[in-house]
């Protein structure tokens, strides 16, 4: 028998075995998440209800009270593991003066600040998973020379992490993964995240358990 045929068959058997292992692991995780949700359904659903209710109340306020961020967008999403995923997001735009060069010294740029938080039921019993993101980036219009040669007037975004320079003039991205115990899900915790989404507090002010933080 040809060596290439045996090699191909061996490779196919390996792929099938790996696929079975992966499917088995997914089913196991789904079952653990299901058991966790069934045990803590009231706690989790009440927490999500509080978040949604507070978001609706804020979104129904007159514009002058939410000029900074507009509205809190929220939605539940289906996931492969049925984690009962819910996410919330807001954004704001700021006009900031930045150093340009020695000739013109400063220029004004628009900074966009986005905050997103995801909540889902964990495979670990009595726990929920939280993913938190904050992104800040400066958006600048194309210069006059590029416009004169027929390019469209559009926004150009630079993406880079905060370096050793002035963090106020740099783009940055923060991303955390952490967990809470189901018993911690109350209206006070919901208020903490709503205040954060409304830009009433900084990320460092959130009650994130340091031992639970996983940086990505």
Image (spheres, grey):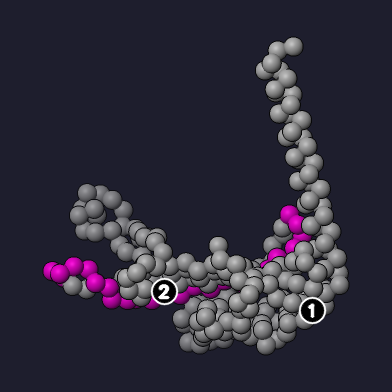
Q: Main secondary structure of the magenta part?
A: strand
Does residue 51 lie above or below 129 as drawn?
A: below
* Location of residue 10 in the rendering, given as x and y in whole percent from the top left corner: 74, 26
- Residue in the image at 60% along x and 77% along y: 210
For residue 153, which quarter of the picture? bottom left
Tell which of 190 and 172 is nearer to you.
172
Residue 2 is tagged as none
Q: Is residue 60 visible?
A: no
Q: Position of residue 76 (x, y in %)?
A: 69, 66
Residue 43's label in the rendered image is: 1
Q: Is residue 58 above or below residue 100?
A: below
Tell me the residue at 58%/82% (across/down).
206
Q: Which residues are magenta?
A: 80-104
Outermost residue on the left side: it is 103
User: Which residue lies at the image location 27% right of the left edge and 73% below the top edge?
Assistant: 98
Crowd around label 1: few <14 · some 14–19 · many ≥20 (10 Å):
some
Judged from the image, the secondary structure of the residue bearing numbered disc 2 is: strand
Q: Which residue is mark 2?
A: 93
């Amino acid at each position: 028998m040809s060596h290439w045929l045996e090699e191909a068959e061996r490779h196919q058997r390996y792929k099938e075995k790996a696929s079975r292992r992966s499917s088995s692991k997914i089913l196991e995780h789904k079952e653990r998440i299901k058991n966790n949700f069934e045990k803590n359904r009231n706690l989790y659903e009440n927490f999500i209800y509080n978040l949604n209710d507070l978001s609706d109340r804020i979104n129904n306020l007159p514009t002058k009270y939410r000029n900074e961020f507009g509205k809190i967008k929220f939605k539940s999403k289906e996931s492969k593991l049925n984690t009962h995923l819910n996410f919330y997001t807001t954004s704001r735009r700021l006009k900031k003066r930045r150093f340009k060069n020695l000739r013109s010294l400063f220029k004004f740029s628009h900074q966009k600040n986005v905050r997103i938080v995801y909540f889902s039921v964990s495979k670990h019993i009595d726990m929920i998973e939280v993913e938190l993101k904050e992104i800040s980036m400066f958006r600048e219009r194309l210069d006059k020379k590029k416009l004169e040669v027929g390019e469209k007037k559009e926004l150009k975004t630079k993406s880079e992490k905060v370096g050793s320079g002035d963090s106020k003039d740099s783009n940055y991205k923060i991303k955390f993964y952490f967990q809470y115990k189901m018993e911690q899900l109350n209206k006070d915790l919901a208020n903490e995240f709503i205040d954060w989404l409304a830009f009433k507090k900084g990320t460092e002010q959130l009650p994130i358990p340091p031992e639970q933080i996983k940086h990505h």
